[in-house]
Image (spheres, grey):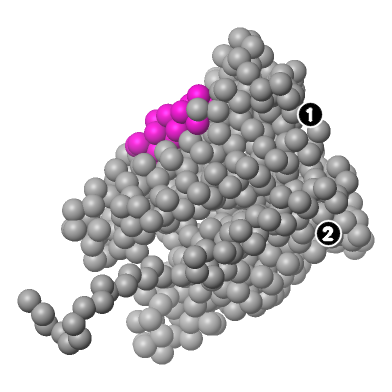
Amino acid sequence: MNRRQLIPLAVAAPLAVLPLFLNAYWIDVLNSIGIYAMLGLSLNLIVGHAGLFNLGHAAFYAVGAYTAAILNTTFGIPVLLLLPVCGLAAGLFALAVARPIIHLRGDYLCIVTIGVGEIVRIALVNNLFGITGGSNGIFGIARPSIFDLTLRTPLHFYYLIWIFVALTVFVFHLLEYSRFGRALNYLREDDVAAEGSGVNTAHYKLMAFVVGAGWAGMVGNIYAAKMTIISPESFTFWESVLMFAIVILGGSGSMPGVLLGAFLIVGLPELFREFANARMLVFGAAMIAMMVFRTQGLIPSRPRIYRIPAGEKGEGRA
Amino acid sequence: MEQFFQQLTNGLAVGSIYALIALGYTMVYGVLKLINFAHSDMFTLGAYLGLTLLTSLALTDHIGPLWGTVVLALMVMGLVAMVGALLDRVAYRPLRESPRLSAVVSALGASIFLQNTVMLIYGARYRVYPHDILPRVALDVFGLQIPLVRILILCASLTMMAMLYIFIQRTRIGTAIRAAAIDQGAARLMGIDVNRVILMVFLVGPALGGAAGLMVGLYYGQINFTMGWGYGLKAFTAAILGGIGNIPGAMLGGVLLGVVESLGAAYLSFAWKDAIAFCVLILILIVRPTGLLGERVAEKV
């Protein structure tokens, strides 16, 4: 084990014991940070790795959360069992909306994703098919339970959320270093060259969208389980903006960066509470300052390093 | 038929307001390839500055409603233009050489900052414009009763758009702006001071946005510090619809969006008004991926 491999452990250990010293309020703040960290990581696959400009991620998050809420309240299926269903629903939704628009260039894609986000929110407010509960949303989602333990306190959810964060980091780390991840980076750097080297760019872009969206759908499930009430207000354009800011501010394409970004974007407004009404003003100024002083993000992604297998010295071996 | 023409003229008025805001987005995008999310707050700022100047100076009492409003609009435009230039200096200029998305986040930060500045100064509640500035009469146009404010807004924004078009097409600095939008490096080699061009864009764009804010205040009579989000998003949609970076495109996109939205709200469903605008956008982009008047470029290799 080298030093770099110890870093995750050094981050995870304090996080595991931290809530024992905090009150319910701060545990809840950490829960939000965890949720946004997962959303940020899933968006990072789309924005950071594939280089697709997605400012409507909240739509997929919403699809997951509403899938969980509707199936739970009407059929009584335990929320956490619905995790894969929510992921699938959000993924399929992403597939359906992204299929015709995935070829759009950067900023055109951006406005379309904003549009999709808004359409989903308006559909939820207008009580689409009579199942989304309109602007009041859906309440009475049953508390999730694991074996005999019913999760109710912030502390229970803390462990649920952060174990899921760890899982997210693990899965996306594997993806990043897979053939899939390499293909995404290639098409982000040079679309045409990737296509020329036999990477099916449209397919990979679409898959990045679907996987990222599906994961956000699962996070939506956890959010629904935690809140027991969901409403369209939780899935506004503002949420998409936050997720986007987490990715870029932390360091696009860099997982430690995105995690740090989640801590700052969700945590800073809490720390600025002493500024009372001016807290969002200070937050906005801090966002500008961070971008001006760290233009690549706080922890920029490092280029991939490939070791040349050691062999005889010299070049030009046949 | 009466309702149709009322909605149509209303759509034209609202659409021309969208077009004015969209011009700010599209000009900045043309030169910097940056989506200036803080532009929506220039609009809000225009509305609030207009209210302050209106109530404190009482210009309309001294020099008549029409000229009073014109002078007021010029003052608002001047002030908002200065804020725009300042915004560029603080939030965007340090990020010229950095990845494009970093500047977008800086823009989002600036937007949050400005929005909250307005909230702290003016309060979070709706503010009401004095309703006796422009005479509340309706004009008889071919048998239609159309409010005077609506006609004035339409005329004013069309005038401003025409002036901008002449400015961009006929003057030296306008030519420089177009050149910098096509190729910044080449423009610099031809002796164009690109920083001056950018400054110009950040003066003209916010000035038009500020004027649009004032118009909304006069048209609807009430303003709120969060109103920029909605109008900004629509205007940005309009800019994309016409083909971003393209100035006539922004005008066309804005007016089209206003009309579609207004008719959609009247005949399809009011609750789905905002969704209709985005659906139209998505459909058009599926058919024409670079907008209505967008350039049909092959991707650079």
In the displayed structure, A75 sits above or below B53; it is above
Numbered label tally: 2
Name the foreground residue: A12 vs A31: A12
Closer to the camera, B217 or A123?
A: A123
Tags 1 and 2 both on a single chain: yes
Q: Residue at x 51, y 74 (%)?
A: B98
Residue A8 appears in the rendering: yes
Residue B244: where, in percent of width, then height? 44, 56
Query: Going from the N terminus, do you reach mark 1 or mark 2 first?
Result: 1
Q: Nearer the viewer, residue A17 or A49?
A: A17
Q: x and y percent of residue A293 in the render? A: 63, 77
How far apart in space, not on screen, are marks 1 and 2 (Cα)?
Answer: 26 Å
Mark 1 residue type: Arg
Determine which of the numbered discs, if any, sits on residue A271 in the image: 2
Residue B204 located left or right of residue B136: left
Question: Residue visible at 23% across and 52% down?
Answer: A199
Residue A277 part of the magenta-drawn span: no
> Is residue A214 or residue A240 the one in the foreground?
A214
Is residue A93 located in the magenta-colored stretch of the structure?
Answer: yes
Is B266 above or below relative to B11?
above
- Tell me where residue B186 appears, x and y as whole percent: 35, 82
Range shown magenta: A85-101
Q: Residue furthest front?
A: A1
- Whether tag 1 and tag 2 are in contact, CB under 8 A, the answer is no
Q: Quadrant of the C terminus of chain A?
A: bottom left
Q: Secondary structure at mark 2?
A: helix
Going by the image, does B104 lie left or right of B77?
A: left
| Badge 1 density bin: few <14, some 14–19, many ≥20, Cα 10 Å | some
Q: Amino acid at mark 2?
A: Leu
Quadrant of the image occupied by residue B150 = top right
Q: Which residue is mark 1?
A: A152
Residue at 45% x, 33% y is A91
